[in-house]
Amino acid sequence: MRGRTTALVAILLAPSLLSAQTKVSGRIYDASTKEPLPFVNILLKGTKTGTTSDFDGNYTLSTSDPADSIIVSYVGYNRLAKHIRRGVTQTLNLELERKAFSLTTIEVKPGENPAHRILRNVIANKNKNDKNRLASYEYEVYNKIEFDLNNIPEEFKKQKLLRPVKFIFDNIDSTDVKQKPYLPLFMTESLSNYYYKRNPRYKKEIIKASKVAGLEDASVAQFTGDMYQNVDIYDNTVLVFSKNFTSPISDNGLLYYRYYLIDSTYIDNNKCYQIQFKPKHKQSLTFQGNMWIADTAWAVKRIEMSIADDANINFINTLNVVQEYRNLDSAWMLSKDKLVIDFALREKKMGFYGRKTTSYEDFVINQPQPDEFYSRADNLVVEKDATKKTEEFWKTVRHDSLNKNERDIYKMVDTIQSLPIYKTGLDYIMMFTTGYKMFGNFEFGPYYNTLSYNTIEGARLRFGGRTSDSFSKWYELSGYMAYGTRDERFKYKLGFRSFITKDPRQLIFIHYKNDYEILGQSQNGFTQDNILASLFRRTPLSSLTEVQEISFRYEREWFQGFMNKVFFINRTMTPLGEFKYSYFTPENTLAFKDNLKTSELKLFTRFAYDEKFVDGTFSRTSLGTKFPILQVNYSVGLKDIFAGDYEYQKLVVKIEDRFRINPFGYTDYIIEGGQIFGTVPYPLMELHGGNETYVYDPYAYNMMNYYEFASDRYFTVQAFHHFDGFFLNKIPLLRKLKWREVVTGKALFGTVSDKNRQAMVFPTSLNALTRGPYVEASAGVENIFRIFRFDIVWRLSYLDNPNISKYGLRGSIQVNF
């Protein structure tokens, strides 16, 4: 009886034993970066049960089939097998090791590569699937950005100055693969609404909330939204740190990539094809990775990609992009976006991670706002209380809650900012980038103007500075005093600038100076008292003019990208050295003027559509625009107003732009023309900017001398083409150097009217462009050791002018990605 009962129990229990669930969950990470890996294939060995990790690397797998291990595979990583326990729920976090990409020999059989057929369908349906073909759309954006110092040496962590933040390193749990030693430098969250309308084309973003740790500058809030941080794979090229990378779904993708059909799977009830892509050419500006293409719609459902390991880009060890799309009313909208960048000045040295995670919700498709809502004058709005939201507010609006580490970052950043080493580091960065060293309410500088030399002054000593933000963020006092050991004279300048309002941006400027100048010098050129100009000058500097000047300026930004400046300038110019202001009287006798006096009213207009800036307290740095930049300068000389000697008008129009020619790099160009109406002597004409140093100046004529050419009507075209290594990348011995080719060409046309030629006798070195245009060209190599550029410059006209060089080597320092 007992045996029968036991057998009966066994029979009754057998189905439940056989169907005991095995459940495995966890997260998949990159073993080196500790970043989660999305869309990894996970399979229970010996079964047909499998899944892929989600956007954040999480996975869950359950089965009643007998299985004792899982198999994890991911393109670009080594395959991994791990033992699991049957019939229980367990957590298993896994790390995958990267493997080097290598293209092995493939047997090619008749028929088309199926990946190519899928890619052609994707390209054919790009316009249909691209969200920008919609009449309108809007959504809410939650953005989270973090920067952390990484690869921190042990000796650095042990420094006494870092003892107050030792807990950051000590409290990291080494059993958690996500954690690795780091120092948080910056973190921001933002919540915004983004709006788009196709016809007429408008876009607008309203930053509703912004929380920043690590920077005090409120202007940073505008860059935490969605408008500046898009990687749009539907564009043929993806702009990455001013470099044009070819999109894996570019119309010409087959010229740049190799494609492989890896697998098919279901994602959110969409059958998807997994396509792997790799660069065809070494050091090309391309990506490598995987994308999942939705069948029938031929839209990108998911994509995971990183820049090619050997891409010709500086200071970026790795850059990973992960995006996920949702199908909404036949539109494929980006729903999640993750960007991880590993920056470092040198490989395997201390650098920092930049991480951006973005999610998109509350989509509204083809329901446009009224036209008056989309303002061209202000397409980016930061609400006044955006930076004043409470933590309770943030808890309710975050699309994803912060993890423990992210919550701790705000406290960590506050602690780090209080350290002397942090403040000292910021001081040195400021001194390097601005030339000023701060001492409380005062900033000394620029330090590179402290000592210089020229033949008029001899050794020149200068001391100057300005008030700091600690003194005031509304107005600034500045000035300097200089002394020449040869001329034994003091020179000086005093300045004042102040905001009237910050929104809109309105400022006033007043300054007075009595100093020496090089008339007509390029705005990009070194000032005459820059120590580098003294060290690298190819001819002794004697072409100086004493200038006494008082100026008033009002500046108004009407909307971002459009501004006006109004000047009133009174100048007295006195020649120095061998220069004299001479003219012929009606009786044809030679007479001399001690100086020239002018009073000038000037209106400057600048229009750069969609240009964005990073605002400092008073100064600002342009982040550029994809559109041409137009500048118009209109000046009026006022005779007998404050002793002005001349009545004239001057108009100058300038257009500059950049266009990209993938894969041949990009071209910058400048077109400028001007004319003077009235009678003026040569110091008031356009004295074309020469360069008498060995330092290459992109905006000057580098083989032209100072005071060599003047015009009262002129036109110039300048073009600069950067090949970004297109040719040198193909030469094996040079490829690893990552040098980049650059060529330039400049042509200058000009005339001087008879009445202006007779207004004052030209110096013997000064000429009009009477024999055609002045032309020069150059060819060079940039990115030498990542910062140096050298050009050979040829002068192609006016080769018989005295004291000129027909060609020369010029160098410069530039920092580019």
Image (cartoon, rainbow, N blue to C red):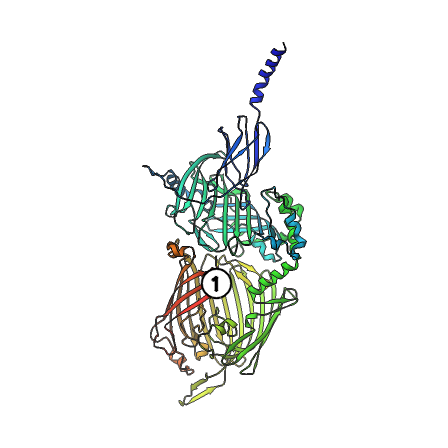
Whether residue 686 is situated above or below residue 339 in the rendered picture: below
Q: Amino acid at mark 1?
A: Gln
Q: Looking at the image, is 693 positioned above or below residue 222?
A: below
Look at 48% across and 54% down and name the residue there: 241
Which residue sits furthest front? Answer: 155
Q: Is residue 804 above or below residue 154?
A: below
Is residue 437 left or right of 289 when viewed as pictured? Answer: right
Give how far across and how far down residue 542 sits, in percent.
47, 80
Is residue 14 shown to the viewer in this render?
A: yes
Number of callouts in the render? Answer: 1
- Depth check: give the residue in front, 47 or 290: 47
Residue situated in front as seen by the camera: 161 or 372: 161
Quadrant for the N terminus in the image: top right
User: Do we see residue 374 in this rendering?
Assistant: no
235 and 577: which one is in front? 577
Res 673 → quadrant = bottom left
Q: Secondary structure at mark 1?
A: loop
Residue 631 lies left or right of residue 392; in this view the side is left
Residue 246 point in image, percent of width and height: 42, 49
Q: Position of residue 380 (x, y in %)?
A: 55, 54
Spot occupied by residue 466 in the image (x, y as percentages of width and height): 61, 69
Within 10 angstroms of label 1, few (less than 14), some, or many (20 or more) residues? few
Q: Is residue 477 positioned above or below 305 on the image? A: below
Q: Residue at the far top: name it.
A: 1
Residue at the disc numbered 1: 814
